[in-house]
Amino acid sequence: MEFYRRAAGSPARLGVFPGTFNPITVAHVALARTALDTLHEVVFVLPRRFPHKDYRDTSLEQRVELLGTALAAEPRFSIAAAEGGLFIEIARECRAVYGDHVRLSFLCGRDAAERIANWDYGRPEAWQDMLREFELLVAPRGGEYCPDPAHSGAVRGMPLEPGCEGVSSSEVRRRIRTGEAWEHLVPTQIQDAVRKLYTGEAID
């Protein structure tokens, strides 16, 4: 795991927020801030490879720069890149850095939770084994997540701030392509950078 920014201290409870952040949105920031009500630190993790998607709009370095600007005001936010894209790979990279004592809580939306819970890991009990290593904090993106009762002890819901429903990186990119208003979907301090990166337009 390579850190671009790391919060001070050694957290007992760490929030892990994987994503492409292509670009980071107000919903990402709001979810991470809500998580800090119960966690000591949140690390935004950009996997160098994902098992289910590719991204070519921007480089990892450009997205790291956007994250750094958007998250600068919160000292308990960290930014890192991980080699693996599966949650279990990211969890083990985190433990190698933060130590075996840390309690890991992965932040995600309902859609991501359903995808990773139903992923074919090659053996039926793999997902249950993973939930012994970390828990999920799931935001109701497009509806509430209803986990298998056998896994419910390792899955907790997180509230979604008003106005964040439907906000996503893909929606930002779609609006930019179609000429619709998108600025309100990303943090104010990165609006000019997003405009330049995703449209090629510079602001004087």
Image (tube, rainbow, N blue to C red):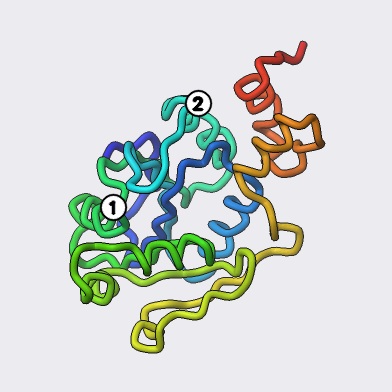
What residue do we see at 35% from left, 44% from top? Answer: 50
The quarter of the picture where the C terminus appears is top right
* Residue furthest bottom as drawn: 149
Corner quadrant of residue 201? top right
What secondary structure is found at the residue carrying circle 1?
helix
What residue do we see at 68% from left, 33% from top? Answer: 189
Where is mark 2, residue-wise?
58
Nearest-to-viewer mark from 2 and 1: 2
Amino acid type, label 1: Ile
Residue 90: give x, y in percent of width and height: 28, 52
The quarter of the picture where the N terminus appears is top left
- Compared to residue 81, the image places residue 38 above or below, namely below
Q: Which numbered disc flags the more N-terminal residue, 2 or 1?
A: 2
Residue 173: give x, y in percent of width and height: 65, 35
Taking 74 as reference, is 16 left or right?
left
Residue 135: give x, y in percent of width and height: 36, 72
What secondary structure is found at the residue carrying circle 2?
loop
Taking 200 as reference, is 132 left or right?
left
Where is mark 1, residue-wise?
90
Q: Residues within 10 Å of mark 2 (few under 14, many from 20)?
A: few
For the residues labelled 2 and 1, the Cα–Cα distance comes to 22 Å
* Near-viewer residue (22 or 179): 179
Residue 153: give x, y in percent of width and height: 38, 85
In the drawing, what numbered circle is on residue 35? Answer: none
Count of picture labels = 2
* Near-viewer residue (150 or 124): 124
Amino acid type, label 2: Thr
What residue do we see at 62% from left, 45% from top? Answer: 25
Q: Residues within 10 Å of mark 1 (few under 14, many from 20)?
A: many
* Residue furthest top as drawn: 204
